[in-house]
Image: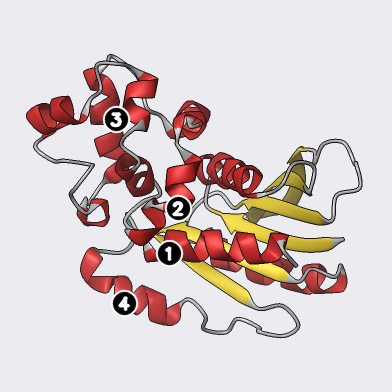
Amino acid sequence: MNRMAIFVEGYTEVVFVDKLIREIAEKNSVLIQWRRIAGGTTCLRSNHQIQAEGPHAGQQHFIVIHDCGGDEAVKTRMMEEYPLLSKAGYSKIVCIRDVYPRVTYAKIADLEAGLSAFVRTKPIIVDFILSIMEVEAWFLAEHSHFERVHSAITVPAIIAALNFDPSTDDMQLRPTPADDMVACYAIGAQVYAKAQAQLTVDALDYAYVYAGLVEKFPYLKRLCDVITTFLQS
């Protein structure tokens, strides 16, 4: 069985990446497990399962998604787990993190330059994916999902109320995309919360995400390409 490990900063990324994988994968071709890593330094470190991988039915691929509990922890958690993953025969590792709030837009290049520092490249190559400034920028740009959440949340309504156009503007330039999501959902008296991201994730048009939206977001394209290549291996 081919094995890949993905490290993300929180629940929103866990549910989004899970759904993206399932949309790209052929039916019954992949097992996905969720795990949460917590503790360390001042308290006992733990790595425990939060969702099982589901029934085994001859799947060729296994992916474990680790919730690291914060963007600054993603690289650290991965480096801690790397030796164990290597021994377990994993062939791919992906780290996904937001830029906001620790890094300003002007410092993104510095962040990118430092991502691979001190990271082992053998036997497993690690890919780093940045969501600029937050993963919610991808959700904003998939603007068709808003009306599936509530019919009142239209692009014209967003332009009128919030003075930006998610269908044409570059959402990577929005400084706080999660706050924008909250404001957009409020137009339809809906609530956007990271802890309740499943509603948003289920409303996204994944055909557009991996066939159109990737042209606007190079890192999203890399993520889709990595997943596709792994599932075809």
Cβ atoms at labels 2 and 3 below 8 Å apart = no
Say how the picture is coloured: secondary structure
Q: Nearer the viewer, mark 1 or mark 2?
A: 2
Element type where label 2 sits in the image: helix
Sequence-first disc among 4 and 3: 4
**Label 2 sits on residue:** 211
Can you give x and y, in whole percent of width and height, for residue 83 in the image? 78, 74
* Label 2 – label 3 distance at C-alpha: 26 Å
Separation of residues labelled 1 and 2 (CA atoms): 14 Å
Q: Earlier in the sequence, mark 1 or mark 2?
A: 2
- The answer to whether 103 appears left or right of 206 in the picture is left
Residue 41 seen in this snapshot: no
Horizontally, residue 74 falls left or right of residue 180, namely right
Q: State the quadrant of the N terminus.
A: bottom right
**Mark-to-mark CA distance, 2 and 4:** 26 Å
Q: Amino acid at mark 2?
A: Ala
* Mark 1: amino acid: Tyr
Placement of the C terminus among the 4 image quadrants: bottom right
Please tell me whether mark 1 or mark 3 is closer to you in this view: 1
Residue linked to disc 3: 182
Q: Residues within 10 Å of mark 3 (few under 14, many from 20)?
A: some
**Camera-side residue of 103 and 198:** 198
**Under tag 3, what secondary structure?**
helix
Q: Is residue 127 above or below residue 154?
A: below
Judged by depth in the image, the label closer to the viewer, 2 or 4, is: 2
How far, Cα to Cα, is label 4 from label 3? Answer: 28 Å
Q: Determine which residue is flagged by label 4.
A: 109
Q: Are marks 2 and 4 in contact (CB under 8 Å)?
A: no
Question: Which residue is label 1 attached to?
Answer: 219
